[in-house]
Image (cartoon, rainbow, N blue to C red):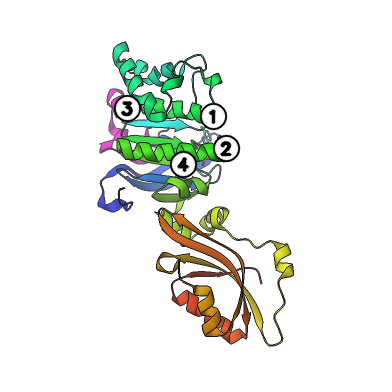
Amino acid sequence: MLDPIAPSRPAAIRLSFLRKRFAAGGVTALDDVSLEVGQGEVFGIVGRSGAGKSTLIRCVNLLERPDAGRVEVLGADLLSLDEAALNAARRGTGMVFQHFNLHTRRTVAENVAFPLEVAGLPRAERAARVAEILPLVGLEARRDAYPAQLSGGQKQRVGIARALASHPRILLCDEATSALDPETTREILALIRDLRDRLDLTVLLITHEMSVVKAICDRVAVMEAGRIIEEGRVFDVFTRPAHVTTRRFVAEVIGHAVPPGTLARLPAPAEGQERRLVQVVFAGPHSTRAVVSEASRDFGLDINIISGRVDEIAGEPFGVMALAAYGPPARVEAGLDWMKGLGLDVTELAP
Ligand SMILES: Nc1ncnc2c1ncn2[C@@H]1O[C@H](COP(=O)(O)OP(=O)(O)O)[C@@H](O)[C@H]1O
Ligand SMILES: [Mg+2]
């Protein structure tokens, strides 16, 4: 797999200072957005509904024209191209949609061939391309089926095959799994990642679900109100989210909100002692260290593990635990400081 650190690789997509305001509604959908996606990366953009994600991804193939800024794709400055050159450049990117956008009266094979038909490819070449691409998405047996006869996952496989029909170097996915159940979502994400590896694609995907980012992305940008508020390697963003919005997104996947009932059942601290509730994120070399037993032994604390889980993000181990630490205030403080000194992310939960 490619090293997911972009700057060492040439950019496949470079967006600079994009602005887009919709007169209808007076909404600024993009407010000075710059972004660089390296070749071969799976880059995620996550944000709530209305953050500007679709507008941003639609600028990459100029389905949406920004009011200002620069759009460079595979080295071409798209806003400077005439119609013919732009259409040629557009064939370098394929797009996958949330609701598949299939022609209901066309078969699987005909849906996949459709963009090639529009591009004026002869019938024989279209057929050859369809025969080549359907096995890549596992649909060769369903080539003559109609969309209504397919499951949601199969429909999206058709959408992906159609997006790949013109041999693009870049795949744009706008909420490609948002209409699918969790199991099918996992399958489709695995397929996209597999296609990235096999076809050496660059993937830009947008989603409102951090679990999608965790499953597939190398890097991620978080959008809010038309701006990118945080950006980085997925592992770093998950283990050290800086912005409050990012923290909320991350918490949806790895969060440990302690249920109020559990809090009520926790023993009160003894006389002269205090109880501190903290979330500890273990990453890198400390993810497998016996931090709890060390803290309890070396600082004389009683530590109650309220919840905990060990996981892997972008192939790196990390763990997250909610702990209740009991002891004399100074020793509890020293124990938590010791954890922070190890580089663990320690945040105070409810009192
Ligand atoms: N064609 C349009 N006309 C007017 N407003 C639009 C249009 N497209 C998007 N918007 C507005 O721009 C903002 C960003 O929308 P969008 O890019 O679709 O966000 P997201 O994909 O993150 O949900 C929203 O407030 C939306 O209502
Ligand atoms: Mg959208």
What element does badge 1 sit on?
A: helix
Magenta residues?
60-88
Q: Amino acid at mark 3?
A: Arg
Q: Is residue 327 above or below residue 21?
A: below
Residue 136 position, x and y percent, is 37, 29
Total numbered labels: 4
Residue, x 41% and y 58% (percent of image)?
316
Q: Which mark, residue 238?
A: none
For marks 2 and 3 on the same chain, the one whose residue lies earlier in the sequence: 3
In whole angstroms, how far apart are the C-alphas of marks 1 and 2? 9 Å
Instruction: Assess disc 2: are there few (<14), some (14-19) or many (≥20) residues with their C-alpha within 10 Å of its C-alpha.
Output: few
Please tell me which residue is depicted at 37% across the width and 35% down the height of the picture: 171
**Which of the marked residues, 1 or 4, is nearer the chain's N terminus?**
1
Residue 133, picture quadrant: top left
Looking at the image, which is closer to me, 182 or 21?
182
Q: Earlier in the sequence, mark 3 or mark 4?
A: 3
| Residue 182 visible within the image | yes
Question: How far is the residue under mark 2 from the one under mark 4?
Answer: 17 Å
Q: CA distance from mark 1 to mark 4?
A: 19 Å
Magenta stretch containing residue 215, yes or no?
A: no
The residue where tag 1 is placed is: 152
Which quadrant would residue 92 be assigned to in this image? top left
Q: Which residue has dot 2 on it?
A: 181
Please name the residue shown 42% across and 16% down the image: 110
Q: Secondary structure at mark 2?
A: loop
Q: Are marks 1 and 4 in contact (CB under 8 Å)?
A: no
Residue 174: percent from left, percent from top: 47, 36
Q: Is mark 4 within 8 Å of ligand 2?
A: yes
Q: Which mark is residue 91?
A: 3
